[in-house]
C-alpha cells in the first residue's frame, strides 16, 4: 500500500468512468480500445482504490474484471496448478492442494494482510502492481510459475521471474492483461517454505524469502530461492541456488548459503526498514527457510 | 458523470438505486440507506471499521465501489439481530465489556461472525489471527477475544 501522502484520504474518489466486461474477450477488446495510460484494470481494488484515494495514482477509466468467471478459480491439471488471475487470495488459501503441496504459496497467502483484504484482493492484482514486496511473488517464482499475458491478438507466456521489470512496472504491454498463472515446477520429493519479516502481523514485508528444493538422500538435487523487498523487483537468487544444488546438507552449508544471500540482494532503506537490517535478517531468513523446506522434503534436520 | 443502476440486497432487503462510478459501498450504506453501523475509519483498508459481509464474506466497504457489487448480497451489523433478539456475538460483546468507545465494534463483530460461520470452534490463537485486521484502540483486545471465545462451540471429541 502507498506510504506517501496517506493523510489525504477521501470519502469519494475522483470521478472516472467504470466499465464491466462480462468475458475475457470483452475485457481484451476494451483494453485494446483504451490503450491510454489513464485506463486501469480493477480487480480486488485493495491497492488500486487505496492509491486513487490517496492521490498516488489517477485513472479516468476502470475496467472491472473481478467477476469474470473464466479468469477465476484454480485447478490441478497433470502436475501443474493453473490459477486464474482474478482468483482471490482467500479462495486460493482455501484450496486443499495449496496447503498440502504448495507450502511456500500457502504461507505467503497466510502472511498477507487480514481476512477481509484477502477476500477482496486477487493473485493477479498482487503481481500486476509490480511491488518489490509482493508476498506471492517469491513463493510463485520458486515453485516454477509461468504466467500468461493475453491481448486481442494472442497470448504470450513467460516465467514469472521475467514478469517484473522495475518497481511498479511489469512486462505487460498496452492492451495486455495477465490472465493465468501455471505453477509447474513442483516435483514429488520436494519441499518449500516462505518466511517473512514485517513490523506487525498484518504488514507489508521488510523482507520475504521463499525456497523450493528437491532432495535425494542427504543431497539437494535441485533448488530455487527468491526474495522480495530487497531489490527493485522480487529477485531470484540463482547464485545461492547453484551453491546448494548437488551439495550435502549441513549447518556449515546453510551458513554459507546465508552469507551468499547478502551479496545477491540490493536492499534500500525506506519507511519499513533499513538496508543494514534487511541484509542481516535476509541471511537468517534464508537459512531458516532452506532448513524448513529440507525437513518438509523428508530430510533430517541438518547438524 | 453517468449514473448506473445497481441492485443490492442489503440485510435481506432488495433495493435498486442509481450510483455514480466513484460512490463507495460505505457511503451508499451510510448516507443513502442510513445504515450507520459500518464506520469510516482509515479509508485505506488498514483498520477494519468499515467491515461488512459481501456474499457472506467480510469485505471493506470503504474500498469497495458500489457499482462493483451490483447484484450482490450485503450484510451489515444492522442485519445481525432478529427483531429485538441480538445475535449471540452482540450479547457476548455486551456481557464481556468488549465495547468501549464502540467505533470498531460493528466491523469487529462482522469479522467475528464470519470466523464463527467458517470455523465454529476457533482457538484463542485462531481468533486473534482472524481479527488482526480490525483495530481497537480501547479494549486491548482481551475482552473482545473472550467475548468471541464464549460463542465458540466446544470442539467435538473425536
Image (cartoon, rainbow, N blue to C red):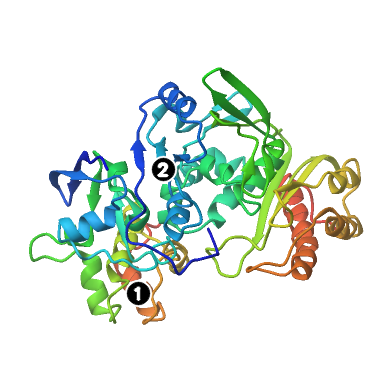
Q: Residues within 10 Å of mark 1 (few under 14, many from 20)?
A: many
Which residue is situated farthest in the top direction here?
A153
Q: How many marks?
A: 2
Give x and y (percent) for residue A213: 77, 42
Q: CA distance from mark 1 to mark 2?
A: 42 Å
Q: Which chain does the residue under circle 2 lie in?
A: A
Give x and y (percent) for residue A49: 42, 52
Q: Secondary structure at mark 1?
A: helix
Give x and y (percent) for residue B65: 32, 48
Which residue is situated farthest in the left direction here?
B83
The residue that mark 1 highlights is B144
Q: Residues within 10 Å of mark 2 (few under 14, many from 20)?
A: some
The residue that mark 2 highlights is A60
Q: Are marks 1 and 2 on the same chain?
A: no
The answer to which image quadrant residue A269 occupies is bottom right
Would residue B158 be seen by someone viewing this image from the given angle? Answer: no
User: Which sits in the foreground, B87 or A71?
Assistant: A71
User: Which sits in the foreground, B129 or A119?
Assistant: A119
Looking at the rendered image, the quarter that the N terminus of chain B falls into is top left
Would residue A105 be seen by someone viewing this image from the given angle? Answer: yes
Mark nearer the viewer, 1 or 2: 2
Q: Is residue B50 above or below residue A237?
A: below
- Looking at the image, residue A75 sits to the left or right of residue B44; the answer is right
User: Which sits in the foreground, A159 or A15?
Assistant: A15
Q: Secondary structure at mark 2?
A: loop
**Residue at 54 percent of width and 56 percent of height:** A112
Amino acid at each position: 500500500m502507498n506510504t506517501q501522502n496517506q493523510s489525504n484520504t477521501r470519502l469519494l474518489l475522483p470521478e472516472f468512468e467504470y466499465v464491466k466486461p462480462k468475458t475475457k474477450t470483452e475485457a481484451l477488446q476494451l483494453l485494446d480500445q483504451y490503450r491510454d495510460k489513464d485506463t486501469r484494470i480493477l480487480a480486488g481494488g485493495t491497492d488500486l482504490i487505496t492509491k486513487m484515494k490517496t492521490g498516488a495514482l489517477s485513472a479516468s477509466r476502470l475496467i472491472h474484471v473481478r467477476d469474470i468467471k473464466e479468469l477465476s478459480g484454480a485447478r490441478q491439471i497433470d502436475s501443474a496448478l493453473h490459477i486464474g488471475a482474478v482468483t482471490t487470495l482467500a479462495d486460493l488459501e482455501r484450496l486443499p492442494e495449496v496447503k498440502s503441496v504448495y507450502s511456500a504459496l500457502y504461507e505467503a497467502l497466510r502472511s498477507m494482510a487480514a481476512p477481509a483484504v484477502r477476500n477482496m484482493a486477487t493473485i493477479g492484482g498482487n503481481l500486476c502492481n509490480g511491488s518489490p514486496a509482493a508476498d506471492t511473488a517469491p513463493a510463485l517464482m520458486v515453485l516454477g510459475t509461468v504466467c500468461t499475458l493475453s491481448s486481442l491478438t494472442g497470448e504470450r507466456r513467460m516465467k514469472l521471474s521475467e514478469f517484473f521489470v522495475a518497481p511498479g512496472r511489469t512486462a505487460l504491454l498496452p492492451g495486455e492483461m495477465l490472465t493465468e498463472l501455471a505453477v509447474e515446477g513442483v516435483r514429488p520429493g520436494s519441499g518449500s517454505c516462505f518466511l517473512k519479516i514485517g513490523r506487525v502481523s498484518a504488514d507489508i514485508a521488510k523482507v520475504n524469502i521463499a525456497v523450493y528444493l528437491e532432495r535425494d538422500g542427504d543431497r539437494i538435487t535441485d533448488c530455487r530461492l527468491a526474495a522480495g523487498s530487497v531489490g527493485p523487483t522480487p529477485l531470484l537468487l540463482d547464485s545461492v541456488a547453484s551453491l546448494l544444488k548437488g551439495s550435502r546438507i549441513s549447518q556449515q552449508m546453510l551458513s554459507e548459503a546465508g552469507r551468499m544471500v547478502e551479496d545477491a540482494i540490493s536492499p534500500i532503506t525506506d519507511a519499513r526498514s533499513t538496508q543494514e537490517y534487511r541484509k542481516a535478517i535476509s541471511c537468517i531468513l534464508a537459512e531458516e527457510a532452506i532448513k524448513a523446506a529440507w525437513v518438509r522434503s523428508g530430510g533430517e534436520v541438518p547438524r | 458523470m453517468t449514473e448506473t443502476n445497481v441492485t443490492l440486497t442489503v440485510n435481506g432487503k432488495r433495493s435498486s438505486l442509481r450510483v455514480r462510478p466513484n460512490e463507495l459501498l460505505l457511503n451508499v450504506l451510510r448516507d443513502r440507506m442510513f445504515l450507520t453501523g459500518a464506520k469510516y475509519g482509515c479509508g485505506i483498508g488498514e483498520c477494519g471499521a468499515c467491515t461488512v459481509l459481501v456474499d457472506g464474506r467480510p469485505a471493506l466497504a470503504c474500498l469497495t465501489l458500489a457499482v462493483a457489487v451490483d447484484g450482490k448480497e450485503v450484510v451489515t451489523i444492522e442485519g445481525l439481530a432478529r427483531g429485538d433478539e441480538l445475535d449471540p456475538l452482540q450479547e457476548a460483546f455486551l456481557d464481556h465489556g468488549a465495547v468501549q468507545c464502540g467505533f470498531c465494534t460493528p466491523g469487529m463483530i462482522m469479522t467475528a461472525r464470519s470466523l464463527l460461520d467458517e470455523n465454529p470452534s476457533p482457538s484463542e490463537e485462531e481468533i486473534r489471527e482472524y481479527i488482526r485486521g480490525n483495530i481497537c484502540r480501547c479494549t486491548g483486545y482481551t475482552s473482545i477475544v473472550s467475548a468471541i471465545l464464549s460463542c465458540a462451540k466446544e470442539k467435538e471429541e473425536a
